[in-house]
Image (cartoon, coloured by chain):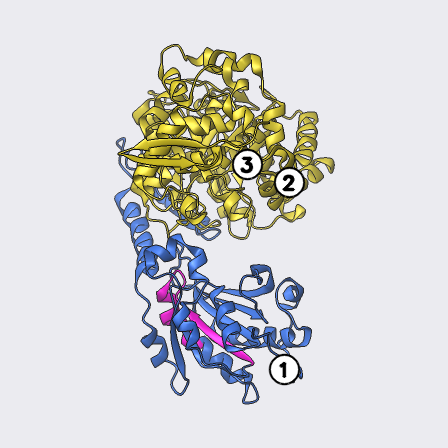
Amino acid sequence: MTEGQVALSSDDLTMWAALRRHTQARIGLGRAGSALPTHHRLELQAAHAAARDAVHSPFAPEVVAAALPGMPTVRVRSAAGDRLTYLQRPDLGRRLDDIDRAHLPGGDWDVVFVVADGLSSRAVHEHAAPVVRATVERLGVGVRVAPVILAEQARVALGDDVAHAMGATMVVVLIGERPGMSAADSLGAYLTYAPLPGTTTDADRNCLSNIRPPLGLGYEVAAGKLVGLMGRARELGLTGVGLKDELDSPPSPLPAPPPEGGPPTG
Amino acid sequence: MSAMSTYTSTLGGHSYRFDSLARLLAAASPERSGDRLAGLAADSARERVAARWALADVPLARFLAEPVVPYEDDDVTRLILDTHDLAAFAPVAGLTVGGFREWLLSAEADAETLAAVEPGLTPEMVAAVSKLMGNADLVAVARKVRVVTSFRSTIGLPGRLATRLQPNHPTDDPAGVAAALLDGLLLGSGDAVIGINPATDSPKAVRDLLELLDEVIQRYRIPTQSCVLCHVTTSVDLMERGAPVDLVFQSIAGTQAANASFGVTLGLLDEAYEAAGKLNRGTVGRNALYFETGQGSALSADAHHGVDQQTVEARAYAVARRYDPLLVNTVVGFIGPEYLYDGRQILRAALEDHFCGKLLGLPMGLDICYTNHADADDDDVATMLTMLGVAGASFVICTPGGDDIMLNYQSASYHDALYLREVLGLRPAPEFEAWLEGIGLLDERGAIRDVSGTAHPLTAIGKELAA
């Protein structure tokens, strides 16, 4: 082998292949001089490109709406007018556009689903509607489900603003997670009971992450967990740290709503 | 302490007014998203330069009279002012910020002079002067500063660059960690520290990782130190129970409230410092603490007191220097685009942090990194590495292929460190270099040999794991 060329022996290849069973880390890549071999450099670029595209591809709410036949949807925007603003101003991504807020349908809703683009519109396009459908199916007819909100340039806390404006007791935000180098299509689900914009914090939420079948969490499993969490949230009147230990317990049936359920609407 | 002053300047026929030193520093700071998010940035490019004109005329002594965070409210301010050394300050006491820049760039300010004046400098003074300096100034001055620390290896000697080997795994799987550890060692990495970010802070998980690293270090007699980056209280607890803790780690920030958000106080750090000193596990030195910092952490914790993110970051270095750490690094691009938007802002912050840390006497290294929602890529990493290598960074963090599968961000790779050592003629820490030579990993030029395809003793680790 001359210096500067990559020539892993078959013995080495066998060893690194065996080691890769234990980790997805990019180990045993070989060298071109001091640098990465061309093949591995391009592999890294491909992973980064997928992540960048997921962050910057525009959200297409009509794609999600079309996959929710028979369910009313409402499109809203956050106060962050474009992607550049969204990435630099988390405060604006947490707040509804004032005009959109005024047009939200109020009602005596038990739960509102907010489909938010977050940092991966691809995750939302592929996985959000199936999770909404599977979850609503399990909730059954006694539960008052609000129109599904499709939110652009939105962060998790935008759901607090939505639920508060609509008078919904609980909010489920389905949002595109920050893309990594191994997955650019992970969907997160955040459940919050009686949220109050500006007061509710992340400690008041329960989260399922990495929803992306077949490699990550499947739709039915995610829906089952969500319905279980919603049931416990209604029993206890809270979500967040107080509900944390219940995450792995089997889903319980949704109990009857409390007599005066629902957050303050002022 | 005297009350806040008003600072003014006139530029292009327009008068600008800044109502406090903190406001002036923020307005003078090079543009970055975090200061805009905090509502502290200059409103226009001209206002920014006007602030710099005003800042250039501020006497350095003014920073002792007008703390940017009130003395009564904040123990970091008290630490800075109570430990300030007036005798060391004397040679620069008569300078303005603008004059200080010129003095730092002059031949008079050599390594010995800079070391002597260091106890007389406050974080706010060095942050202020950095705002008047270009990227090249930040490199030129930082490379004159010499900070040498040691434990089992010696960090910061001239012509040397150390690396942190970071074999993280999303579930702390021992075989996965060991596989990544082998990969890094075969690429000549790990002389600053073999450091793992654990998936959980549970004492049991941390101890398992510490024992794994200790076994490898002892078995192969590697002159380096391990660290599992858990909370300081977890490390102290584990030390008391006899776990093999080499370095005690903690994330720190530049205000009392931001440190509280990390669950630390100066009192807790004092205890950790004392406990680590007693263990005496080093062979060539006794620097036993390791700190990480990063611009934006105080704003993120809503604990910035109206001070710009670069100045608050420099205040964290006053906390670090109290404890004679072996290693300090800024995790410069990890926090995301709401604080540092793109490669240009991350590069600027990296150079500022390295410059300020070095002037304040710290063994400053960097995690040169970015997340996928920042406007940056591996070319930015190469640019930053090269500039920081020229600036004389003590160490850089390296990951397999530049991709950390546990923290989900991209950093420098082991290959990047090979590149930097090659183009700048930098060598590993001397003890580690001797070890590399002893196990046949150095070629005749002193570079790391490509051992793929050869029966190297270290691959025994891999063969065992693979079996």
Q: Chain of mark 1?
A: A
Q: Supply the letter of whichever chain is blue.
A: A
The reply to whether label 1 and label 3 mark residues of one chain is no
Q: Secondary structure at mark 2?
A: loop
Q: CA distance from mark 3 to mark 2?
A: 12 Å
Question: Is B308 in front, or is B424?
Answer: B308
The residue that mark 2 highlights is: B264
Furthest toward the bottom, the residue is A141
Does the segment drawn in magenta span residue B188? no
Category of crowding for the residue at label 1, using alpha-carbon neighbours closer than 10 angstroms: few (below 14), some (14–19), many (at least 20): some
**Quadrant housing residue B152:** top right
Q: Nearer the viewer, residue B163 or B292?
A: B292
Q: Nearer the viewer, residue A262 or A178?
A: A262
Q: Which residues are magenta?
A: A110-130
**Kind of residue sitting beneath label 2:** Val
Which residue is label 3 attached to?
B254
